[in-house]
């Protein structure tokens, strides 16, 4: 479904990612785990067509992101680190706007909005102004905009960052509930997030993939534990 080959990105002298290769199969929920600065956001921005790579290729359902960006964007929903929400719009108004710019046909928009609202637990917030929502609910709106065009793939960049513990649990449950219907790549620097939500995990460190396996195998190898130690040491510093 997603095939990344030899992906490299340099920002001037800084090599953010180097020679990344991995594949994601349909229906998988893959964790993209790595410390801050590892290159997670850079990778996700390239896969979603928001940033050109320096080298390497990405294909989604056989379509090359650089040659057929529109074909890929149709199939991908993206929740960036800082979703572009408009604080003065209502939830429904904003989703209507996003559906329109993503090319959902006018006749299908109402249904698309209903579906996203239901799946993201926003039923009672439909008419609320986004600026008045809690952070957790704003993140639900971010998820709803990512899935408004019913994409096959969802790319979620640190979806629980900045939320309080209760909201974190709710968003994790929500992402988990999407399993099976969508192929998901979820980036995080929080190990328990991966163990709670994902079946498989790619570990990225200093722009390189250092592990790619099922959670079971990574746990057995002790790889997750060593990442955890590294993350906690860095968090303390
Ligand atoms: N626009 C940019 N210009 C220069 N360096 C950048 C830019 N964006 C990211 N970087 C660098 O690339 C590396 C990877 O960053 P990023 O992809 O944001 O990592 P992560 O999301 O894992 O925290 C970091 O060293 C970061 O400082
Ligand atoms: Mg990031």
Image: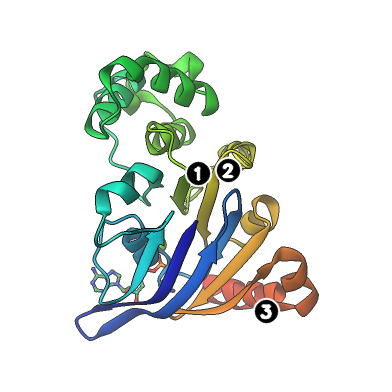
Residue 213, position as x, y percentages in the image: 66, 70
Spatial separation of the CA atoms under disc 1 and disc 2:
6 Å
Q: Quadrant of residue 225?
A: bottom right
SS at mark 3 in the image: helix
Q: Residues within 10 Å of mark 3 (few under 14, many from 20)?
A: few
Residue 96, position as x, y percentages in the image: 29, 22
Identify the residue at horizontal 52%, vertical 21% (top origin). 118
Q: Residues within 10 Å of mark 1 (few under 14, many from 20)?
A: some
Q: Counting residues from the N terminus, which is met first, the one under dot 1 or under dot 2?
A: 1
State left or right for residue 231 relative to residue 138.
right
Identify the residue at horizontal 51%, vertical 55% (top origin). 185
Question: Label 1, on which residue?
Answer: 163
Question: Label 2, on which residue?
Answer: 168
Residue contact at pointers 1 and 2, CB within 8 angstroms: yes
Is residue 98 visible to the viewer in this orientation of the structure? yes
Q: Counting residues from the N terminus, which is met first, the one under dot 3 or under dot 1?
A: 1
Residue 103 vertical placement versus 31 (above, below): above
Identify the residue at horizontal 50%, vertical 16% (top origin). 123
- Between 101 and 196, the residue placed more toward the observer is 101
Residue 72 vertical placement versus 24 (above, below): above
Q: Residues within 10 Å of mark 2 (few under 14, many from 20)?
A: some
């Amino acid at each position: 479904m997603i095939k990344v080959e030899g992906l490299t990105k340099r920002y001037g002298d800084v090599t953010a990612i180097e020679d990344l290769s991995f594949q994601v199969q349909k229906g998988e929920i893959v964790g993209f785990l790595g410390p801050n600065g590892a290159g997670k956001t850079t990778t996700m921005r390239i896969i979603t067509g928001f940033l050109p790579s320096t080298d390497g290729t990405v294909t989604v359902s056989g379509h090359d992101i650089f040659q057929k960006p529109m074909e890929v964007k149709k199939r991908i929903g993206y929740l960036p680190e800082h979703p572009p929400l408009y604080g003065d719009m209502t939830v429904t108004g904003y989703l209507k706007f996003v559906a329109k710019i993503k090319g959902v046909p006018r006749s299908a928009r109402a249904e698309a909005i209903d579906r996203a609202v239901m799946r993201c637990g926003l039923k009672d917030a439909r008419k609320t102004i986004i600026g008045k929502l809690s952070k957790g609910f704003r993140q639900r709106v971010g998820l709803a905009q990512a899935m408004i065009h019913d994409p096959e793939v969802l790319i979620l960049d640190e979806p629980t960052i900045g939320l309080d513990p209760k909201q974190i649990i709710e968003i994790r449950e929500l992402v988990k509930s999407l399993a099976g219907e969508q192929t998901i790549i979820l980036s995080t620097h929080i190990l328990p997030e991966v163990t709670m939500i994902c079946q498989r995990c790619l570990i990225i460190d200093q722009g390189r993939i250092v592990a790619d396996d099922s959670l079971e195998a990574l746990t057995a190898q002790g790889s997750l534990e060593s990442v955890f130690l590294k993350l906690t040491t860095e968090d303390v510093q």
